[in-house]
Amino acid sequence: MASIALSHTNLALVKYWGKEDEGLRLPSAPSLSLTLEAFYTRTRLRISKENRFFLNGKEGGGKDAERVFSYLSSLLAFFRLPPSKFVVESENFVPKSSGFASSSSAFCALAAAFAEEMGLSLTKRELSIAARMGSGSACRSVFGGLVLWKEGKTGGESFAVPIKEAPSMDICALYLSLEGGEKEVSSTEGMRISRSSPFFQIWREECRKACAEIQEALKAGSFERVGEMAERNACQMHALTLSCGFSYISEKSLRALRLAQSMRKEGIPCYWTCDAGSNAAFLCRKKDMALVEGKAKEAFGSGLVCFPSGPGPGVKVKREV
Ligand code: PMV
């Protein structure tokens, strides 16, 4: 017997960057994301005599396994369950060569498979809270489409809610694989350092405003406004890290930003965003995707690897007998 969960990654239009409580993973501000169809994690979990972790078919030890089992222990304690051991088999359908992180889908799938296997019958809100304890952004992957993560003052108040699980707005993402390699500053460390920025309070306020404004723009059906706010928020996040003396973006990430801006001058609504790494993503309409991809290949060379994606669904889980 085992439980299998399938969870899609999400791309933040308003970034989660900064924690009020590191242990509980309480964010300093709300964030807003788009769950993506193209990238997902499938996790199979069963109770066993010993802890074993497999990633993409290979048994993994080290930091990944440590994080998985320390998270599962914290869930056992949180739900007041007796100590147990697990075999966890995860497959990441996040293109390997892309260098994109998969912690949102990974920890959401893990939380969902755990809850199912332990017979917890959690509501989506409770599942979002449990996923948040593994990786902040994972709480948003519980839902499909456009999702808001409310900041909340306590662990029980900080969870994601769906804005529109099947968005009527034509909104897609094109990931650009610009550079490989491990990032030098982990997001946990980066968030910690960023709190010392003289601009940190302004950043929090800007995220609150951006979440409200994007929701208004979604209601008004203005893709351009959503894109503008998302691009500005990504620029602000990277300005914040730079104000503390470190940065994730590279010369290529900045070239991608300039490319989005020049596409807009040509009348193609395309907007830039970038997470805690140098690979950027473009937001565009589905009908413009081929054109945007062509422009990216013109700028970065025909060998550029791109990954297009439309909105994806929330987490799904089933029990295998
Ligand atoms: O969930 P974490 O701890 O991997 O942090 C994610 C941080 C960003 O991807 C940069 C932003 C976000 O909201 O997803």
Image (cartoon, grey):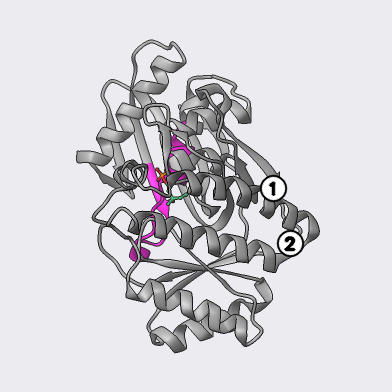
Magenta-colored span: 90-111
Q: Residue at x 37, y 31 (%)?
A: 22
Which of the pair 58/219 is nearer the observer?
A: 219
106 in the magenta segment: yes
Tell me where residue 8 appears, x and y as whole percent. Answer: 53, 49
Which of the pair 215/167 is nearer the observer?
A: 215
Tell me where residue 186 appears, x and y as whole percent. Answer: 29, 48
Which of the pair 283/17 is nearer the observer?
A: 17
Query: Is residue 7 shown above or below 235?
Result: above
Query: Is residue 181 shown above or below 216?
Result: below
Q: Is residue 55 left or right of residue 225?
A: left
User: Mark number for residue 213?
Assistant: none
Q: Residue at x 39, y 66 (%)?
A: 279
User: Mark number for residue 165?
Assistant: 1
Badge 1 amino acid: Glu
Q: Is residue 242 left or right of residue 173?
A: left
Which of the pair 184/243 is nearer the observer?
A: 243
User: Mark number for residue 169?
Assistant: 2
